[in-house]
């Protein structure tokens, strides 16, 4: 998308086919939230985690469906932030943009922490912060390549991540049928309610946030939807992507749970590596760990791309300093000041990884997931004002809101998740205080612009 210098109008002519947007979406979404966060979810709820991912898939589909329909009807550079502003006013666009910026910075931090954990699989004596610095620099380099460079990178990453998951599914299936590990393998099939929900309803409830977090990234598809050749293809691109994700997520987790007891999984190791550790597959942990690093790096890069672009949009609408739209040099594809603030946020994440490596991943992951869900509420609420209402859309809206509120409230059921909830509410409080000052500024600007 480019701006017409004569009249400021937005040129929405795109270059992406719907399947390319689907592939970019998969590249942006499949990451450590799934490859590592799923282990946390399993520890919370046991085999019933499969239902957590099913509920999250339904909720995510509902949110993306309304976002895609709004994008098709009215392509906007600010995507969900622009729609919130159109629906509820300036305060909503401002709040939505900064909530999203913070959520994506937190996601970048959680990805950095997870990447460092994966890298220490090979280099256990090197501190986490060293890996965090290395991956940060590489991620910023990809963002500096601009939109087309980002698209190419995410397409490659998506293929690698899908291949890694299918490799696990294939190997796990071969193990089940006795090709590896002997024929005496006893499958872990829960046949009673207390085995399916070993930690009760509260355990399942608290696992929802980690399942939803594994689908985080649909907002980036909203930002990229304006690049579609046919804007009406946005719903089709998202539907295909989410159905694919739901199938491979639930299939791979189910296979992992069939191979070993859910009690054997650890929060600091991918459940897919844990599931195949006891079998004659010495190569698998190393190959899969490499895929995990690529997956985490991919989603971290997507987050950096998203926060840099949303900061530019906020700057253009007067909700952030104008300097963040400044492009230094003729060949610059990304405003350097915007990328600089993003780098500062990454530096903060590195300090967190250094100061409290024990629980930082779970704290940041929970807070990041919650901030995303707050924005998803904005998307659903805006759709009620901007899209045509009918019985079907009303039912989907209610189901979506209920599932999101369940995931948010479920964080209060577990000590670690509860801390992430407090962190997210603290960020909301800061944004609210800034918003109050901004509202006074907007009111004064209106008074000065009004005729005497």
Image (cartoon, grey):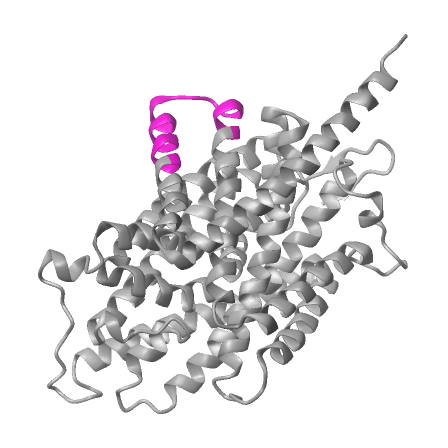
Segment tinted magenta in the rendering:
382-401
Q: Tell me if residue 353 comes above or below residue 332 in the rendering.
A: below
Residue at the image position 62 percent from the left and 74 percent from the top = 132
**Residue 24 magenta:** no
Magenta-drawn stretch, dominant element (helix, strand or loop) = helix
Check the image and name the residue furthest to the top. 452
Q: Tell me if residue 131 comes above or below residue 445 in the rendering.
A: below
Judged left or right of residue 132, residue 32 is left
Q: Total number of numbered labels?
A: 0
Q: Which of 447 and 287 is in front in this view?
A: 447
Q: Position of residue 124 (x, y in %)?
A: 51, 88
Q: Tell me if residue 440 comes above or below residue 215 in the rendering.
A: above
Decide if residue 217 is in sight here: no
Position of the C terminus by quadrant:
top right
Judged left or right of residue 342, residue 357 is left
Q: Tell me if residue 427 comes above or below residue 381 in the rendering.
A: below
Decide if residue 412 is in sight here: yes
Q: Position of residue 294 (x, y in %)?
A: 53, 73
Residue 346 sits in which quadrant?
Answer: bottom right
Q: Where is residue 46 in the image (x, y as percent from the top left)?
A: 24, 63
**Residue 385 magenta:** yes
Judged left or right of residue 19, residue 433 is right
Residue at the image position 30 percent from the left and 49 percent from the top = 205
Residue at the image position 69 percent from the left and 50 percent from the top = 309
Q: Where is residue 305 in the image (x, y as percent from the top left)?
A: 66, 57
Position of the N terminus by quadrant:
top right
Q: Which of 412 and 138 is in front in this view?
A: 412
């Amino acid at each position: 998308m480019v701006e017409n210098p004569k009249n400021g109008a937005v040129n929405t002519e795109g270059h992406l086919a719907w399947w390319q947007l689907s592939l970019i979406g998969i590249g942006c979404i499949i990451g450590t939230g799934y490859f590592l966060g799923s282990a946390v979810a399993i520890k919370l709820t046991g085999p019933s985690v499969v239902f957590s991912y099913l509920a999250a898939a339904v909720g995510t589909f509902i949110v993306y469906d309304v976002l895609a329909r709004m994008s098709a009807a009215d392509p906007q550079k600010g995507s969900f932030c622009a729609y919130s502003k159109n629906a509820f006013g300036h305060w909503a666009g401002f709040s939505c943009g900064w909530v999203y910026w913070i959520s994506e910075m937190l996601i970048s931090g959680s990805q950095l922490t997870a990447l460092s954990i994966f890298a220490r699989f090979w280099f256990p004596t090197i501190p986490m912060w060293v890996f965090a610095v290395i991956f940060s620099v590489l991620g910023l380099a990809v963002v500096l390549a601009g939109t087309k460079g980002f698209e190419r990178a995410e397409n490659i990453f998506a293929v690698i991540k899908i291949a890694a998951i299918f490799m696990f599914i294939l190997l796990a299936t071969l193990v089940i049928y006795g090709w590896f590990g002997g024929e005496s393998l006893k499958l872990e099939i829960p046949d009673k309610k207390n085995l399916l929900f070993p930690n009760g309803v509260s355990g399942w409830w608290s696992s929802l946030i980690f399942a939803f977090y594994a689908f985080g990234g649909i907002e980036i598809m909203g930002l990229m939807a304006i690049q579609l050749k046919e804007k009406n293809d946005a719903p089709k691109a998202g539907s295909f992507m989410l159905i694919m994700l739901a199938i491979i997520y639930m299939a791979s987790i189910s296979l992992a749970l069939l191979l070993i007891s859910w009690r054997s999984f650890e929060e600091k190791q991918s459940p897919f590596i844990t599931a195949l550790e006891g079998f004659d597959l010495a190569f698998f942990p190393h190959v899969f760990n490499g895929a995990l690093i690529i997956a985490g790096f991919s989603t971290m890069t997507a987050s950096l791309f998203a926060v840099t672009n949303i900061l530019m949009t906020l700057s253009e609408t007067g909700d952030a300093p104008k300097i963040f739209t400044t492009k230094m040099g003729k060949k610059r594809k990304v405003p350097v000041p915007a990328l600089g603030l993003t780098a500062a946020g990454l530096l903060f994440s590195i300090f967190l990884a250094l100061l409290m490596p024990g629980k930082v991943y779970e704290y940041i992951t929970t807070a990041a997931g919650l901030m995303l869900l707050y924005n998803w509420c904005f998307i659903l609420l805006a759709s009620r004002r901007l899209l045509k209402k009918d019985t079907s859309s009303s039912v989907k809206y209610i189901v979506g809101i209920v599932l999101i509120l369940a995931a948010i409230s479920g964080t209060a059921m577990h000590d670690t998740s509860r801390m992430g909830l407090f962190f997210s509410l603290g960020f909301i409080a800061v944004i609210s205080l800034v918003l109050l000052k901004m509202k006074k500024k907007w009111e004064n600007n209106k008074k000065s612009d009004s005729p005497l």
